[in-house]
Image (cartoon, helix red, strand yellow):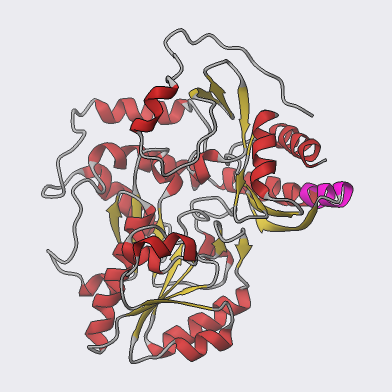
Amino acid sequence: MTLPVMQISNEAATPVPASAQPAILGTYKRPPAEMVRGDGMYLYDANGKAYLDFASGIAVNAFGYNDPGIAGAIQNALQTGMLHTSNLYRTRPGEELAEFLVDHSFASSVFFCNSGAEANEGAFKFARKLGRSIAPGKTGIISLRGAFHGRLFATLAATDRAAYQAPFMPLAPGVSISERSIEDLDAVLDARTVAAVIVEPVQGEGGVRVIDRGLLAELRAMTHERRIALIFDEIQCGLGRTGTLFAYEQTGVVPDMITLAKPIAGGLPMGAVLMTGEVAAVMKPGDHGTTFGGGPFVASVALHVVKRIAEPSLLDQVRDNGAWMGEELHAIMRRTGRARAVRGIGLMWGMDVVEPAAGVVSRAMDAGLLILSAGEYTLRLLPPLVMTRDELREGLECLEEVLR
């Protein structure tokens, strides 16, 4: 089915002239539609067309658009008059947010920053400081085949995308990629030289691949024995996306650090590193810093968001709707013959299709459905955590028609 076009009144919105678009650096290939408004599970363009959102701003918009709770949290934060104070001074919102995250996880301390890539870079630094406290040469960082950890120099080195890396060589030294097997990891995890391994429990950009629990358990035992920090990158798969507050809760493994971003502040820029006491103990004043990370305005909104995501009723809904969605995607694969595989957990699903994914994404947008790709032949579906079963069904019916 093609989703209905909903006309809206938006007198203040006017399309951006084509001549103005080159002012933005061309690092993204954007379709011509200009988004001017969001409400509930829909985005609207300047022509009034509605798009059911199965992308969530790449897993950011956990509560969809125009959420009254987030709007209220923003208004409350504005009343203090403190958009920014810097990290030279204490402010209560960041401390309360850190306390909440610590109380609901394995962590003893939290570092706040501005993005997922910064969170991963921070975790690499913390791991190297810890590694050097054990042995002077213990500085190496290992990631897995299929990984995506960011586009800064160290995180790009840990990202398994040769095309992304090539224009910016040389990248940060001491970072390398291992195959996703315990035998390969055993060969590269040298206790004398490796400080940390970073793993996405569910690889998002790498094709929505759920990493095997058995591999994670063996990796945890190996890193414990060799005193190597285990970092879970939960930037895309964390904070409710898999049906638990943190993805690690479903693996049977407790890492030394997890990195968060995406939905944490409801669309405002924020990242975080959660860490054990052992990691925190090696970090001293001046070792790392950030001007904006954990500021009072963003932290106030983030506290509202993470408290809502942590509600058991919401997490139950994500698990139930996620299981249903997986069954429906498998049925679509069987009925259409246009897909080869379906993978995922919670509200994070990938579908390998028999044609280039970019064409399917484009046709879906024409039909009023926003989806993503995760590789040349993989579709990625990341609906808001609060999307209803009826809205999910509407989107999947549209996807099936698009595939046909």
User: Which residue is nearer to you in this view: 368 or 381?
Assistant: 368
State the image quarter where residue 108 is shown. bottom left
* Residues drawn in magenta: 328-336
User: Which residue is nearer to you in this view: 218 or 80?
Assistant: 218
Residue 197 is one of the magenta-drawn residues = no
| Residue drawn 43% across the image and 40% down it | 305
Q: Position of residue 190 (x, y in %)?
A: 40, 90
Q: Is residue 162 above or below residue 282?
A: above
Q: Position of residue 112 (x, y in %)?
A: 29, 53
Q: Quadrant of the C terminus?
A: top right
Q: Position of residue 128 (x, y in %)?
A: 27, 76
Q: Main secondary structure of the magenta part?
A: helix
Residue 141 relative to residue 384: left or right: left
Q: Quadrant of the N terminus?
A: top right
Residue 132 relative to residue 274: left or right: left
Q: Is residue 140 above or below residue 365?
A: below
User: Which residue is nearer to you in this view: 128 or 13?
Assistant: 13
Give the total number of marks visible in the rendering.
Answer: 0
| Residue drawn 48% across the image and 25% down it | 66
Residue 252 relative to residue 66: left or right: right
Q: Position of residue 242 (x, y in %)?
A: 59, 54
| Residue drawn 20% across the image and 53% down it | 290
- Res 39 seen here: yes
Residue 244 relative to residue 265: left or right: right
Query: Going by the picture, which residue comes out furthest to the right?
Result: 335
State the image quarter where residue 274 is shown. bottom left
Q: Is residue 92 above or below residue 287?
A: above
